[in-house]
Image: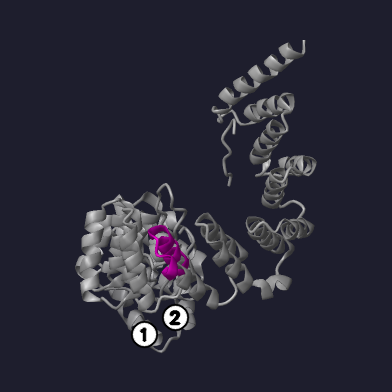
Amino acid sequence: MLFTRRLIGKLLISWLWLAALMTFSLTAHSNTTPKMEIVAGKPTFVLPQFSGPYSQREASIAPEEYETAERLRTMLDSDQRDAVLKELEAFYDIELSPAMLTLKAQIYFSLKMYDKAEAAYLVVLKRSPQLIRAHSDLAQLYLFKEDFKNARKYFANAVAFGSNEALIHGQLGYLNLTLHGPYSAISEYQKAMALEPENKQWQQGLLAALTQAKMYEAAQALLQELLAQRPNEPELWLNQAALALHTEDFSQAAVSLEMAILLGDTDQRNLKTAAQLHLQLGGYDRALALLEQSLAQGKLDIAVIDEYFRWLSQLGMWDKAGQLLSSVEKDVAQMSSDNRSQYYLRRAEIEAHKKNFSTAKGYYQQSLTHNPSNSNALLSYADFSATRGEFVDAELLYIRAEAIPGGEKRALLGRSQLYIEMQDYASALKQLKTTYQKFPEMVELRDNIEIIENIVRARETAGA
């Protein structure tokens, strides 16, 4: 080879009335490890239901409102919110005390009349900016409206005016983590956890904040404490595995994932990551067992099958790769054209490895029949043809691949190599220069271009 070939390759939250669940991915980087994903529960929010009438300690009722307030309280106890609202709306806002106006805002909120509730809360805070309850309620309202910036602002206001509720600290920690990064969230989660040390949301939130801040020792210490308390909880072992991936302790990650699986976790993404770790660590039998367990759960996306295939083929486990494809053969007829194209491409590569060239060629053609724009199939078929000396076919396939996004670089390099093997050095030089012009970051091509130029000059001199 005169040059090197290269392979080319939340905030989404469902704000529920009682709770929300989020997942996130963690990636470990090493020279041999592709992306690994562990799915575990992460910091969540609890949005409390409408919590009833005003708090006496935060907003006082005017003396002349006592009788009305008691009557409205009785009506609220019997869930006559519409009637209460009708009576309150009979007054101008200026006629109502902050407490009664807060009640009006809360009823709007509970009836999902969010715009009116927002306006009422803002009037309350304009008149009495220190009212903690109004700040925290308005923050909750902004969560429902998915205005997370204002939600964070009013939770922070509630804390600044003296709120010491675990829920408020926890929600502020979550929004800080989401909007401003982990360092602004750690102290709020710690305060929430100090008030409610057994609350899993605050434990998970603090763990996530410490991990994202790369305070791995502190995160590990917290996790060990939680595992000592709840050793049979798979969620904690998944977090242990994710933390181990961050520190590139792949052996610990594999052990932790195995514990989670033993305790009942069956998420396909976690099974896939466990299999990947075992492959990397040389535990091929266990890796294959995990792949089979993943497959047994039902249909897998072809992208997952393809990823499994690449792992096995890179390890030279072609028989196992063939078994993997055979396991989904019954589903090929129901696949999309693109997926069928990828399936037949992998079949072709297996047959080519077995030196069943005629069968391999048939599978390559099937792959391109189902998707003529499959750049991977075009390039693999071109390499296959070039290896067998079918240079014309290889050249046409490379030319087709050049026109497809994502395949241009490899196609240009493949065609350059093809011309070199054909000893057509003038064409190879032209192709290399075109490649370098389009991909100037490939500085290694300069030496190859210089070598080919010398060969071309030498041939021209010899011919003269």
The quarter in which the C terminus is drawn is: top right
Image location of residue 431, percent across then percent down: 70, 29
In this orientation, which residue lies closer to the viewer: 110 or 126?
110
According to the image, label 1 marks what residue? 71
Q: Residue at x 45, y 59 (%)?
A: 10
Q: Which mark is residue 202?
A: none
Q: As drawn, which residue projects farthest toward the bottom? A: 78
Q: Which residues are magenta?
A: 271-286
Packing grade of label 2 (10 A; few <14, some 14-19, many >=20) is some
In this orientation, which residue lies closer to the viewer: 249 or 103?
249
Q: Is residue 286 left or right of residue 391?
A: left
Question: Does residue 141 show up?
Answer: no
According to the image, label 2 marks what residue? 84
In this orientation, which residue lies closer to the viewer: 46 or 303?
303
Q: What secondary structure is found at the residue carrying circle 2? A: helix
Disc 1 marks a residue whose amino acid type is Arg
